[in-house]
């Protein structure tokens, strides 16, 4: 591979053995950078066998507090050009929060996220209908309106995860591409208030390599290329 190859000694929490890592760089061979007019920055790494594209919303930090469950999301696309099968292990994607004691979070499991959101819906509904309305019947209309608004946020997030989340997949010549959103939890005693710019490193196991995408929010880039393309909108 003609891209920048280094040795990474701390790739995933479950993998303590140093392995070869391909790191995205703005001027490295087989690495691309594009600013989309959809509000996202696109980072690409390619080899003879595969291409990986990371898309990050330039306002991702601002969107986090408005989600039903605060978490950081990125959009990933894998394109496979090899002859045999390629297993893409979504459960081993990892994000390092560089400015927060280098905390590393593995990607959230979509099914666990859906279960957690459903539990939140059940708990919230029970709290309002069985407790708050009984304590303050005079505020029924207001509380029911607020409940429906919050339930709408939860159900929209669940619909998005159900249809757009990236799940483990095996790519091959007949099924050569996969795309979807990946989310990372941000609740940790070592993750404090956001700083500007924030710095992250996304690590993805691909074949016998780790593909690393260092990126900043807001992005620290030079010229902007505007180009229209269809895309999935983040929640």
Image: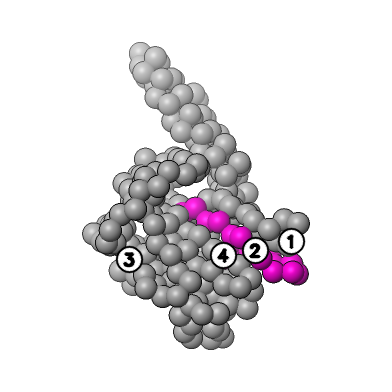
Disc on res. 85: none
Disc 2 secondary structure class: strand
When the figure is inspected, residue 175 is found, relative to residue 67, above or below; the finding is: below
Classify mark 1: helix, strand or loop. loop
Q: Is residue 165 above or below residue 148?
A: below
Q: Nearer the viewer, residue 126 or 165?
A: 165
At 39% across and 44% down in the image, what residue appears? 38
- The nearer-to-camera label among 4 and 3 is 4
Which image quadrant is residue 42 in?
A: bottom left
Q: Position of residue 228 (x, y in %)?
A: 43, 43
According to the image, label 2 marks what residue? Answer: 80
Please provide percent x and percent y for residue 92.
58, 67
Q: Is residue 26 above or below residue 168?
A: below
Contact check, label 1 and label 4, Cβ < 8 Å: no
Q: CA distance from mark 1 to mark 4?
A: 14 Å
- Residue at left 56%, top 65%? 51
Q: Which residue is mark 3?
A: 199
Distance from the alpha carbon under mark 3 to that under mark 1: 36 Å
- Are the residues at dot 3 and dot 1 in contact (C-beta closer than 8 Å)? no
Of the image marks 1 and 2, the number of the one nearer the N terminus: 2
Could one spot residue 173 in this view of the protein? yes
User: Real-space Cα distance between discs 2 and 3?
Assistant: 28 Å
Q: Determine the CA span between mark 2 and mark 4.
A: 6 Å
Mark 3 or mark 4, which is nearer the start of the sequence? 4
- Residue 120 visible: no
Q: Which residue is mark 4?
A: 51
Q: Earlier in the sequence, mark 3 or mark 1?
A: 1
Q: Quadrant of the C terminus?
A: top left
Decide which of tag 1 and tag 4 comes sooner along the chain. Answer: 4
Of the two numbered discs 2 and 3 in the rendering, the one whose residue sits closer to the viewer: 2
Question: Do labels 1 and 2 touch, CB within 8 Å?
Answer: yes
């Amino acid at each position: 591979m003609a891209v920048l190859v280094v040795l990474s000694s701390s790739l995933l929490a479950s993998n303590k053995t140093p392995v070869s890592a391909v790191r995205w760089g703005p001027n490295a061979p087989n690495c691309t950078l594009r600013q989309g007019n959809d509000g996202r920055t696109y980072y690409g790494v390619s080899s003879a066998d595969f291409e990986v594209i990371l898309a990050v919303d330039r306002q991702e930090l601002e969107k986090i507090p408005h989600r039903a469950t605060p978490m950081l999301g990125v959009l990933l696309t894998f394109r496979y050009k090899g002859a045999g099968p390629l297993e893409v292990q979504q459960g081993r994607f990892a994000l390092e929060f560089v400015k927060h004691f280098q905390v590393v979070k593995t990607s959230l499991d979509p099914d666990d996220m859906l279960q957690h959101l459903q539990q939140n819906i059940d708990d919230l509904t029970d709290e309002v209908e069985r407790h708050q309305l009984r304590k303050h019947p005079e505020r029924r209309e207001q509380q029911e309106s607020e409940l429906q608004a919050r339930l709408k946020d939860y159900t929209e997030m669940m619909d998005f995860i159900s249809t757009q989340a990236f799940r483990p997949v095996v790519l091959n010549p007949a099924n050569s591409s996969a795309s979807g959103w990946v989310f990372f939890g941000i609740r940790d005693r070592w993750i404090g208030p956001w700083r500007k710019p924030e710095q992250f490193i996304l690590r993805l196991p691909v074949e016998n390599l780790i593909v690393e995408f260092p990126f900043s929010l807001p992005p620290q880039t030079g010229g902007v290329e505007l180009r229209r393309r269809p895309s999935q909108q983040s929640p």
